[in-house]
Amino acid sequence: MNRKWWTLAAVCMGIFMLLLDITVVNVALPAIQVDLHSSFSDLQWVIDAYALTLAAFLLTAGVIGDMMGRRRIYAVGVGLFTAASLICGISSTSLILNLARGVQGVGGAIMFATSLALIAQAFTGKERGAAFGIYGAVIGGAVAIGPLVGGAITSSIGWRWIFFINLPIGLVAVLITLAKVEDSRDPTSRTVDWFGFVTFSASLFMLVFALVQGNAKGWRSPTIVGLLVGSGVLMIVFLVAEWRQQHPMLDISLFKRPAMVGVSLAAFAISASIFAMFLYLTLYLQEVLGYSPFQAGLRFLPITVLAFLVAPLSGKLLVLVQSRYLMSLGLLCIALGCAVTTHVQADSTWTVLLPGFILAGIGVGIVNPVLASATVAVVPPERSGMASGSSSTFRQVGISTGIAALGAVFLSQIKPNTINALATTPTGRSILAHGGGHLSAVVAGGDVRAAALALPAGALRTTLIDAYKVGFTTTFNHLMAIALVVSLVGAVGSFFLVRQRDFVTGPALDAGDSDGTADSQVGAVDGAHGVDGARDGPGAVTDRSTKATPPWRPARHSRGRAEESRPSEAGGTVR
């Protein structure tokens, strides 16, 4: 088989493993909590540890790949992700699991930052469009089946196997990469901005840590106040340093264009709203409704499958409808999906979520390809890699801060809401009288079912569980309302900021793919962690027509016309 197809196979295997692992973790969280005796904060870190390191390393990993060779760095990323998966699978404590998840995020950042550049250097012309189409289909497929696969594995052989399954896939991907993939590097590559990397990472970590620990330590405690102030100071230092850097990790000048601000806002909003809510949706389905991981995974399919099916249609509409209209429409669908899911009751069935799942799935399917295309269309071609890496970073920041902020609200409300529900019945008041502070700690930690099992079977146990369901659903509705506001802000912001006159070119399409299918498929990404799969990292390549277009609609791409070649950031040429 030709080397280029081996390259595509190695990249698709790595990215499939990466995205499948992201989505399967969601439905396994309750099982992890029971097995490792984890607190609710520990569950947050299972997701946030991964998202934080992915956001922090993404832009830097692309530059390192350009400098040291993309094949070698991609193999390192896959190897690191695979080794971390082994540690995740054998973890005996929540701390070990979360540290390993952080290492997984580093490996994932390296894989995302170099994967598209490897494909771009191996393929040209129409074959490149076909390769990107296959790559996008693999991404969409992994996202669509992830919850179901995760539920099946967790229900049958245990949550640890959602990590162990990565071992053979990762090993084969590394061997193929080292044996068959051609190496490349950019001799004019920028230097690594280590100062920017450290200040950005530290600021983001301090913010998330403060949000996660705020309820436990007290929001006015010196520790939390110090972390929040330190995070703000470091972020200001980062922005000033990036503005003055000759080779910054994040080019601040990109945000002079309102459209780039709008695109970044949309990337943050979609992740901080519906994707951040996946943790709480999972807990509702399993902890409140009592579904197994597999049954919960089945009920997530309306979101993931619809997102996969709608994405190609949204990509095709880009040649007819302005990006801001589609982007705003998608985020508005997500907002409506959140709105119809703010009336969940303790005795509701799972179908109360179905209208919201359908609307949110359609919204995600609309936004992902449009966001991927607009990100690289609002900057000059030579800055497309930085822009797409920036969009991916905003997605991961949205995930990590969204989960942490919603978690802070959850922990502040779940205890009083549950106690209030207990206080409405004589049996509940008896539980409060004898439970005291221990009951409050159990409710805040999310281990209510274990506490209920310690009570005598009958009225006491049933009353405690019923009160927790009331407290959870009341809090859940508040979290969904917050997600509604975030997605609505993203819809309004993208509508007014993503102005057509700021676009450098029309919608970005991959070479040889004039109908936009590849681009829309590549943008059909998730699910749990919503990575901008279109063109990640500084090594990315974008193919676009530069034909002028009327301001009322995006540019159409000429068909069957030979275009001049220009150097790409991946080291090859773009047709």
Image (cartoon, grey):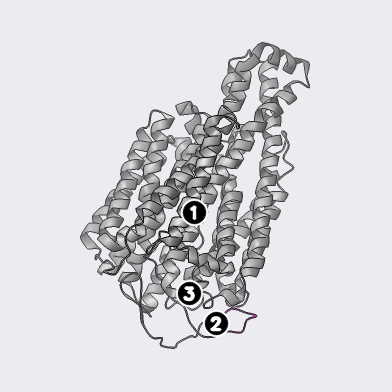
* Residue in view at x 39 percent, y 66 percent: 540
- Where residue 286 sits: x, y (%)? 58, 35
Left/right of residue 561 with respect to residue 325 in the rendered view:
left
| Residue 145 visible (yes or no) | no
Q: Inspect the image, locate mark 1, and give the three-letter code of the amino acid beneath it.
A: Val
Badge 3 element = loop
Label 1 or label 2, whichever comes before in sequence order: 1
- 225 left or right, relative to 534: right
Which residue is label 2 attached to?
556
Report crowding for label 3: few under 14, some 14 to 19, many 20 or more residues within 10 A (C-alpha). many
Looking at the picture, which amino acid does disc 2 mark? Arg
Mark 1 and mark 3 lie on one chain; the one further toward the N terminus is 1
- Residue at horizontal 55 percent and vertical 75 percent from the top: 503
Where residue 509 is drawn, which disc sits there? Answer: 3
351 over 29 or under it: above or below = below
Residue 441, compared with residue 498, is above or below; it is above
Q: Which mark is residue 402?
A: none
- The residue segment tinted magenta is 548-554
